[in-house]
Amino acid sequence: MKRIDGKVISDHIKALAAAETEQLRAQGVTPCLAVIIVGDDPASRTYVNNKKKACELVGIRSLEFALPGTAAQAELLALIEKLNADSAVNGILCQLPLPKGIDEKTVLTAIDPRKDVDAFHPVNVGHIMIGDPVLLPCTPAGIMEMLAYEGIDPSGKNCVVIGRSNIVGKPMAMLLMAADGTVTVCHSKTRDLASITSQADILVSSVGKPHFVTPDMVKPGAVVIDVGMNRDENGKLCGDVEYDAVAQKAAYLTPVPGGVGLMTVAMLMKNTVTAAKMQMTQQG
Ligand code: GUN
């Protein structure tokens, strides 16, 4: 089994983003990412800190806007409007989940699609759906980079995605399909899950439950991508996949931590640079 090293691949993506940032700076443009966090969810705080750290490393300017958990939706929308109008801001990211009482769809749709570095706006989702992506959703695009780096071509392969979220499952299926994979999406209502997953040449799990993917669900020689970010019984960070047991069966496996999570942040850097470049040409 080969462990797919998210650290090595994400460092590579960030180095490319840093080189492009350097070029933009030489032309007088410093890419800038605005990160919005609402409330004090500890996991969200960690993710936002990681994103800011990556910006620093790559040379992207980052701005943080922290609103209290009690903030009104109108306040958040007003902030997004202000950032949309600010030509110095190239990317806007609103960390999810949002507190109860704030409608996620309304908020994500308020972000200018050209600054939507998460690619969650319906316009960008539409671009992905028709195979004409502008900004790519960070986690699925990061997984495609991992596959490419390892020389794994999804073309003609059975690809099974467990999970149908807007953030991972659905866009993952679209990207694998665009790469000519034969894609099956499974979810909580799927019957006889193991019979489907055990036919997968490429299996992507985005369930959010520790020990969910067991060896009986995995085809010998499969590529297994673990998107889970869970805490186990001892409070330790773990994925969806029973790593040691599945490692005996899979040909490739991503670890947690040190896998997909690092790619998400690296792809955010890449999207911010892409957004900055796009906005330069649009503004003449
Ligand atoms: N929450 C979990 N994953 C993500 C992500 O990729 N982007 C944002 N904004 N929030 C998230």
Image (spheres, helix red, strand yellow):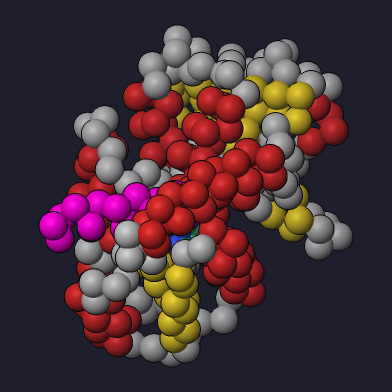
Q: Could you say where residue 47 lies in the image, as x and y percent from the top left?
A: 59, 65
Q: Position of residue 5 (x, y in %)?
A: 71, 37
Residue drawn at point x = 51 percent, y = 63 percent: 59
Is residue 83 among what the camera can see?
yes
**The magenta stretch spans residue 279:** yes
Q: Quadrant of the N terminus?
A: top right
Q: Name the spot of residue 131 as percent of width and height, x first.
A: 26, 30
Q: Is residue 228 above or below residue 80?
A: above
Quarter of the image for the C terminus: give it: bottom left
User: Is 18 drawn above or below residue 260 in the view shown?
Assistant: below
Residue extending farthest to the top is: 156
Closer to the camera, 167 or 13?
13
Q: Main secondary structure of the magenta part?
A: helix
Q: Residue furthest front?
A: 26
Of residues 178 and 232, the one drawn nearer to the viewer in this rendering: 178
Residue at 33% from the left image edge and 65% from the top image edge: 28
The stretch of residues the image draws in magenta is: 268-284
* Residue drawn where x is 43% and y is 49% of the image: 20
